[in-house]
Image (spheres, rainbow, N blue to C red):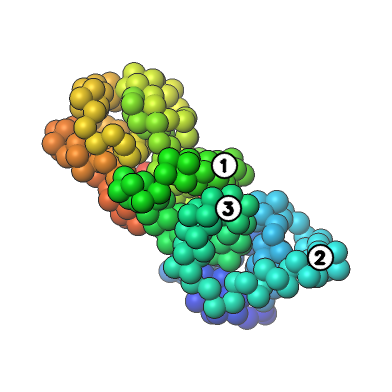
Amino acid sequence: MDQKHTIKAVALRTGLSAHLIRMWERRYEAVNPDRSDTNRRLYSDADIKRLSLLRRATEIGESIGQVAGLSDDELLSLIGQAQIETPFKRAEVKDRSAGISPEDIVERAWHAIVNLDADDLQATILDASVMLTQPVLMEKVVEPLMYRVGEKWNAGDVSVAHEHMASAIVRSFLGGYLTSRKKIPHAPKMVITTPTGQRHELGALMAALTAHDLGWQSIYVGPDLPAHDIARVARQEKAQAVALSIIYPPNDPILAGELNRLRQLLGDDIPIIIGGRAAASYGRVIDKIKAIPVESLSDLRRSLENIHINYPCSKPS
């Protein structure tokens, strides 16, 4: 009989985090471990081998969604062929990632923004997406980087050109990242957008990716939507929650009315989550409509985990 291993042991042997292993299992059916009498995951040696192959495939730039369905032999062939075709490029990526922290990546990205070096900024973010797990990428790189861009722009330390270049590249990356995510059958649904007058959508895109990472089906419908359209989508999709990002401006006289109207249209049964740099400026109306305020992506993650208690996925996590 094959020896069985706990997720902690598998994480140590594969170099993958326990969180990423669970995500790959739940979202992509990468492996199908047994369960103990107490419902703990138990992995076989074959599971460990497969997870190690999948890790190597992602390290050479492949998307987990594209390779999770391949056989072990196909993964071995893919990895071997990539090493033959681009040995210098792959070695360069490995060397660049060695000893580099998320803070280092943010500094490199900021240097590219200051110098209006779009190619270097794009390369930095792509490298980070290979080196880091999605939660770390979102919470330790993209979120603090774009917060710095906003603060420096407001202070006049960088120009509109700097802000626009950074936003365009990050928005393109996040949009592509989101559309490549595989839908999770029977997952709870969340509509994510920005309300009327809020045209900055990076926060909403980051929220959509964070929700998807936690097992939600993120329904991102773009920015700047009026309350009646948000409510219509939520009702049509039978969503279990609505998330709004409020970045700028912090003093829109129309927004309070829109938030009140959204609550009236949704009723009291659908949670509304509100975050973003300017959200605190609307604290009074957020309290009035009994929305859930979040101050960061990690805060959003905790709030979604609490909501998950009432709306669990079809598969155990």
**Can you identify the residue that label 1 sits on?**
172
Secondary structure at numbered mark 2: loop
Crowd tier of the residue under label 1, counting other residues whose Cα lies within 10 Å: few below 14, some 14–19, many 20 or above = few
Q: Is residue 287 above or below residue 109?
A: above
Secondary structure at numbered mark 1: helix
Sooner in the amino-acid sequence: mark 3 or mark 2: 2
**Can you identify the residue that label 3 sits on?**
117
296 or 269: which is nearer to us? 296
Which residue type carries mark 1?
A: Ser
Sooner in the amino-acid sequence: mark 1 or mark 2: 2
Circle nearer the viewer, 3 or 2: 3
Crowd tier of the residue under label 2, counting other residues whose Cα lies within 10 Å: few below 14, some 14–19, many 20 or above = few
**Can you identify the residue that label 2 sits on?**
86
- Residue at figure coordinates x 48%, y 54% from the top left: 114
304 or 169: which is nearer to us? 169
Which residue type carries mark 3?
A: Asp
Q: State the image coordinates of residue 193 (x, y, percent, origin top left).
A: 40, 33
Tell me if label 1 and label 3 are in contact, CB under 8 Å.
no
- Which image quarter: residue 60? bottom right
- Residue at figure coordinates x 67%, y 79% from the top left: 1
Crowd tier of the residue under label 3, counting other residues whose Cα lies within 10 Å: few below 14, some 14–19, many 20 or above = some
